[in-house]
Every structure is written in C-alpha cells, then in structure tokens.
Amino acid sequence: MVQTVSIKPVESTSITVKQEIKQGRFFGALIASIIFSLWISSLLLCLSIDLSKMPIFGVAFALLWQTFLYTGLFITAHDAMHGVVFPKNAKVNHLIGSIAAFCYAFFSYKQLLNNHRLHHRYPGSELDPDFHDFKHENFFAWYFLFIKRYWNLGQWLGLLIAFNFMSHVLNLPEINLILFWTIPPILSSLQLFYFGTFLTHRKPKEGYNNSHHTQSTSLPVFLSFITCYYFGYHEEHHEHPHVPWWRLPALRNR
C-alpha cells in the first residue's frame, strides 16, 4: 500500500519567495485557463483539418505544438498538487488539477498527488515513486519503469473506448486522432521525464550535494520554457515547491 504523506508548506524568511506566492494568487488560474483554452482549441482544429492539404512540415509543427500543450496540461496538474493554481480555494484548485490530469491521459489526480507528495518527501530514495529502482538507471529502463508506475489497465481501456467513440460515433479521422490526440501525450511523457526527472534527479558523478537529490539544468530561460515549462530549474522547485512554474526563473536568477 502506498504511504500517504503531505507536502509541508514552504518555511522561508525570504520576502522575495513570499511575494512570488502572493502575486500568484489569481495569475495561476489565468495561466491555467490560457493553457486549457489553447489546448482544446488547437486540438479541435487539428482533429478537423484535412491532412492531405497540409504540407508535411505543417503536420510536424502541429504535432509538436500539441505535445507542448499537453505538457502544459500536466504542469498545470502538477502546480495544482502544490496548491498554487488557485490558492484561495483548495477545492477549486484541486478540481482544476483533476481536469488537467484527466485531459492529459485519463490520469487519476489523487494517485498523482499522493505519488508526488512521496517524491518531495523522499527524493532519490526507494520510497520515491519517480526514482529508478537502483538497478535500471539508464534513460530507457528508468523511463519504462516510470511509465509502468503511472499507467494502468483502466487508463488504457478508457483511452481505447474514447478513441473508438471519437472515430466511429463522432466520425473524426483516425489519422488525425493518432497524430494529435494519441501521440502528443506519449511524446509529452518523454519530454517531462527527460527534462523534469532524468536530467534533474540522476546521480552526478560527484554525488548529490543537497538533501533534495536534484540539480538544475543550465538552459537559458527561453529554452527552459519550451523544453519543460522551466522544470529544468528543478533544484529551485524542490527548495520552494509552493512557487508556481512561471516564477521559477525569478528564483533561478536571484
């Protein structure tokens, strides 16, 4: 049975960090709304276009754009787990997170929340559900172990039923569904794992130098944004988990 734990609020005397949290009381919900709006409008457009009339580079761009927006959905669910999407109302905050997790790939927000709490409490240990098993540390072995812990038969069945409903009842083109609804969350999971877990939590040659067992990537702000919504700044996230993703560069550059 998975142990249930809670993430304690950030204890810090830093005025800057407190200001970051205060300023995000409503802005987090606005950003989440923008991500949701872009995701649903882009998805509807991609599912309705005639691919035979699109150049190959246009299809590739649309696929990558959808992948980026799916990553945004997961990041929104992640921030909801830390209570920073809508801090003024916990129920609304977690409702937004639940919707984002479901839209991403029919994930159980409750399971994600519990696992993420364990990740923050026991990073880089046997109790960390995001960490490898100390036997398979290379990228692919760790990734498949990571996926195995989060995907289940119910999700696969739900996605299969949804795919067939959209294909045979709504008459949406199957190739569009595959390219813009099925593949993007898979690519997004690779993106999230590589930039947000593998690079940031793998053990350095000289060993970990902090209790979070993490390190930040050195990508500049723009590249950090397009690769994983600033989650390459992972040491800053673990030090200040109640600072939203869009405030991480401010902590990085202090």
Image: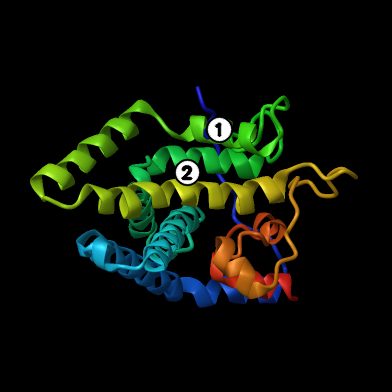
> For this view, does 29 lie left or right of residue 164?
right
The one of 14 and 52 positioned closer to us in this rendering? 52
- Element assignment for label 1: helix
The one of 13 and 1 positioned closer to us in this rendering? 1
Q: How is the image coloured?
A: rainbow
**In terms of sequence position, does the residue under pointer 1 or pointer 2 come before the other?**
2
In the displayed structure, 178 sits above or below 5; it is below
Looking at this view, name the residue that lies furthest to the top.
1
The three-letter code of the residue at mark 1 reads Phe
Look at the image and tell me whether residue 249 can be seen.
Answer: yes
Disc 1/disc 2 C-alpha distance (Å): 20 Å
Residue 91 drawn at (x, y percent):
34, 55
Residue drawn at (19%, 52%) of the image? 173
Q: Which residue is mark 2?
A: 113
Residue drawn at (33%, 42%) of the image? 106
Q: Residues within 10 Å of mark 1 (few under 14, many from 20)?
A: few
Residue 213 drawn at (x, y percent):
76, 45
Q: Which residue is mark 1?
A: 144
Residue 160 drawn at (x, y percent):
26, 35
> For this view, does 99 lie left or right of residue 229?
left
- Quadrant of residue 10 within the rendered picture: bottom right
- Element assignment for label 2: helix
